[in-house]
Image (tube, coloured by chain):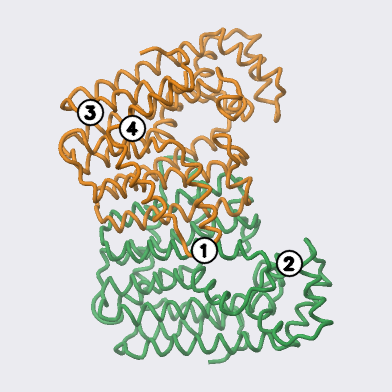
Chain colours: A orange, B green
């Protein structure tokens, strides 16, 4: 598995391959998302349409549908609406993330926050959470609800952890892994674990582990991207995490044996409310030179191998192959 | 039932009487709230402690417990944690309301918003929603979950409606009643309906109607208070709704046959981003003179009678008497 950057076209083609075994079912999921977010209210309708534009690649529903098909015939009466529900929950977290960060762009599109108002983005997120719960009640599977309830708690605790890390530079590798497990991996795990509950219950534990490790790899890749990619591809500026004083794995690793002079530069960045481009670029170089990117890539590869190993116990199938390819997609998309 | 203002001591005594039949059970509810909001995270713990201070009079848990006891022996294995859950959900909505309104005070105490940060208040609200859902899953009653899911959706739609009312002065009485049913009455109804499901299932419909009407009376009283009470008692300035360009029943009623001159004054207030004290006081007088308060009180009394009628079918009991007294409390507390 190469960790070098691929072209955008290659990445899209890879996603296309991954989604091939569930293409028809994904179409049904889109319709279900509409049904779930629809409300007799022009604003909700309008924001809902905007969110449908935001929903992007439906990666989490794809994982759920693939997981549900690794063994037997999936139970689509539950799998399709639940794949939609996992995306609605994901949208709820995105809307609130953007509200919290006062972000104006997401995937190159204006956020709800920017397009409507901060107030509307808070309440629209709540609406999407409420719809998630209503849909789970409609589907009526307690084990599934338990998985969703747990990940919702984990995700918000993860965010609180991040917001309450007052002394950013003391944030260590354990803190980081605890954070990404909660913030990102919990929802990936929900997708694959709930998928298992819709047709592959005997593989529940393996698929849950797979989802968690995949989500961790996804976030490590995302955090690396902040150091390696230019604005054009991401729709957001490189070094954004640094500008916002967010400490991720590359910086944590680089800081370990960093001499006083570069460390002072890093501390300077974290003491300035709005560090300028030169300072950000300088710290990106320092992190690179002190092995931060290399270390983060290595840890990402380890997590990736754990994801692969989790798939080993599953029977051969097109769905399993696609899940395997999803690992490569998560990495190539970003690194 | 008198609609004149009573002293604060009288109101507290009235609440004491209402809570007497469920005093011991309310103590257990407080412990359950702690259990539900506790997290292995100093910040959540700290904010949780702050919220426990905010939780105030536990009026919604009181209603749930009373409703559960109107007929038979209540099922406290469910009633106690669900009474706690309804308060946690209420706290979640308060935290997000304050975040949306950028409020700094609530019941005379600083808001999470003011005390920590806007970001933390958004995520802390999400955390409380997640805990609500997790607790509902733990209790494991689908009918109860259905009631909660419906009211969560209604509450957020109510808020969206309010935020999307662009031309405030065209907001009419139907809009107003739709709004307060969603924004306030839905959670009161949840409390009494879920209470019914924990011991008085045959009275579910009557208790649901009672809760809804009580909640509407509560909100009408609250909106009247904004016109009639001074800062000392409420912890917030009189006329706050007008300052924030919120249109409530007194203004809607007063505007109906209002001559051009005073109407212009009202329009002036609504065109100024930050109307001054004199203008607010002037519009309060205009609304009073044009019968707005009188009309709102009359509608409040109608709703109150509907709440009383809903109790008529219940058997005599201490709980029923206390629910009846709760109507008077809602009115006297405010008017």
Measured in 3D between alpha carbons, the distance from the residue under mark 2 to the one under mark 4, in whole angstroms, is 53 Å
The picture quadrant where one finds residue B307 is bottom left
Q: Position of residue B91 (x, y in %)?
A: 49, 59
Label 4 sits on residue: A19
2 and 4 marks in contact (CB < 8 Å):
no
Name the chain letter of the residue that bears numbered label 1.
Answer: A
Front in this rendered view, residue B140 or B34: B140
4 and 1 marks in contact (CB < 8 Å):
no
Which label lies toward us, 1 or 2? 1
- Side of A178 where B43 appears, left or right: right
Residues flagged by tags 3 and 1 on a common chain: yes
SS for callout 2? helix
3 and 1 marks in contact (CB < 8 Å):
no
Label 3 sits on residue: A318
Label 2 sits on residue: B243
Which label lies toward us, 3 or 1? 3
SS for callout 3? helix
Measured in 3D between alpha carbons, the distance from the residue under mark 1 to the one under mark 2, in whole angstroms, is 26 Å
Residues flagged by tags 1 and 2 on a common chain: no
């Amino acid at each position: 598995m190469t960790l070098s950057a691929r072209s955008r076209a290659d990445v899209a083609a890879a996603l296309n391959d991954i989604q091939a075994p569930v293409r028809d079912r994904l179409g049904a999921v889109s319709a279900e998302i509409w049904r779930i977010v629809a409300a007799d209210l022009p604003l909700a309708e309008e924001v809902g349409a905007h969110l449908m534009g935001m929903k992007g690649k439906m990666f989490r529903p794809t994982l759920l549908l693939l997981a549900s098909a690794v063994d037997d015939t999936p139970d689509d009466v539950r799998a399709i609406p639940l794949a939609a529900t996992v995306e609605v929950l994901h949208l709820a977290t995105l809307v609130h993330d953007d509200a919290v960060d006062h972000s104006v762009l997401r995937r190159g599109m204006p956020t709800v926050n920017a397009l409507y108002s901060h107030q509307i983005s808070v309440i629209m997120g709540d609406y999407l959470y409420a719809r998630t719960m209503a849909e789970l009640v409609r589907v009526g599977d307690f084990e599934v609800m338990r998985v969703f309830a747990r990940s919702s708690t984990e995700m918000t605790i993860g965010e609180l952890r991040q917001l309450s890390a007052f002394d950013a530079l003391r944030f260590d590798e354990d803190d980081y892994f605890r954070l990404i497990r909660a913030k990102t991996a919990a929802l990936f795990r929900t997708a694959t674990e709930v998928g298992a509950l819709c047709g592959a219950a005997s593989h529940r534990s393996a698929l849950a582990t797979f989802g968690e490790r995949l989500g961790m790899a996804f976030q490590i890749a995302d955090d690396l991207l902040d150091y390696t990619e230019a604005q054009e591809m991401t729709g957001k500026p490189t070094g954004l995490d640094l500008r916002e004083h967010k400490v991720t794995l590359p910086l944590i690793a680089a800081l370990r044996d960093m001499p006083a002079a570069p460390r002072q530069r890093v501390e300077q960045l974290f003491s300035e409310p709005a560090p300028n481009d030169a300072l950000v670029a300088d710290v990106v170089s320092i992190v690179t030179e002190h092995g931060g990117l290399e270390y983060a890539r290595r840890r990402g590869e380890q997590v990736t191998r754990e994801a692969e190993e989790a798939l080993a116990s599953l029977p051969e199938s097109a769905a399993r192959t696609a899940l395997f390819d999803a690992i490569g997609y998560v990495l190539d998309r970003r690194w």
